[in-house]
Amino acid sequence: MSMPQELEADLGLILFHRLRRGVKLTAAGQLLLGYAQRLDALAVEAERAMAEVKGLCRGRLAIGASTTIGVYLLPDLLGEYRRRYPDIELQFDVANTENIERRLADGTLDAGLTEGVPPNHHKLDTVVFLRDKLVPIARPDHPRLTAGSRPMTLRQLCAEPMIVREAGSGTREVIDRALAKRGQKLQRIPMILGSTEAIKRAVAAGLGVAMVSHLTIQTEIMSGQLAILPVNGFQLTRPLHRLRWRDRAQDPATLAFFELLDRRCTPDVGQEAA
């Protein structure tokens, strides 16, 4: 059986008038031809679109980041990404780790960047892309920063009035775990604030000291509003993670973002998070 006859048999319709001098389409054949031509045009359009996606001339990248990364690290990185790939639609949200994990699972995010303790979801691929230092800060006129002062001990630091984030924040969790590991805990907490910016302002106003990400204080250190307190024998780092959903294929836009992130941020793999 020829291909036209097979098609007619499958459809249960006559598609061709078979004449002595050739064939002519029936009404059903004319209708089917229109669909076939539209499908052919769609196939060409789809092939062209896939080539554009592959060449990063079209596409979408949705990223979720926790606060420190989203506010202090990611904007410059996304600026470079936009300059490299101006035709990629960017969506960027700052959210907590739980929210980022949920949105990776439902496919509304392509990638996530989080701080501190790594997610334990078995379907998440987690890679450390940077190790962030948490440093104690104070006003530059703090007694421990005057000429000739000796560095503090960790016990002395814990006795300082310490301004902290709320319980459950990533930074607070890392600090509490690191101090407990060394048999220490904060002795005086005069103020609990909901953002790093608020904490920095409180410290600059002389209301206490704090421990914050080194990424967050570059401007204040250069301008002399804040200074890092020297502490003997104490270094605290936390891993920053990039996340993706394991069972989902990575499109070119996401792969290009991860490549740029890896070039810009090199983790010190020999330095363990405290």
Image: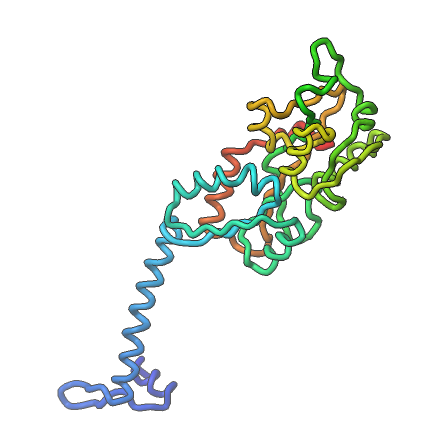
Give the residue at x 71% y 44%: 169
Q: Position of residue 110 (x, y in %)?
A: 53, 52
Q: Residue furthest right?
A: 183
Left or right, 3 with respect to 156, comes to: left
Left or right, 216 with respect to 57, comes to: right
Camera-nearest residue between 21 and 58: 58
Give the residue at x 53% y 40%: 74
Give the residue at x 84% y 32%: 187
Left or right, 123 with respect to 111, comes to: right
Q: Position of residue 142 (x, y in %)?
A: 71, 20
Left or right, 146 with respect to 10, comes to: right
Residue 80 quadrant? top left
139 shown above or below 63:
above
Residue 158 quadrant? top right
Q: Position of residue 198 (x, y in %)?
A: 65, 38
Number of numbered discs: 0
Quarter that holds the C terminus: top right
Q: Residue furthest top?
A: 148
Residue 150 quadrant? top right
Coloring applied to the structure: rainbow
Quarter that holds the N terminus: bottom left
46 shown above or below 190:
below
Give the residue at x 45% y 49%: 253
Q: Position of residue 153 (x, y in %)?
A: 80, 20
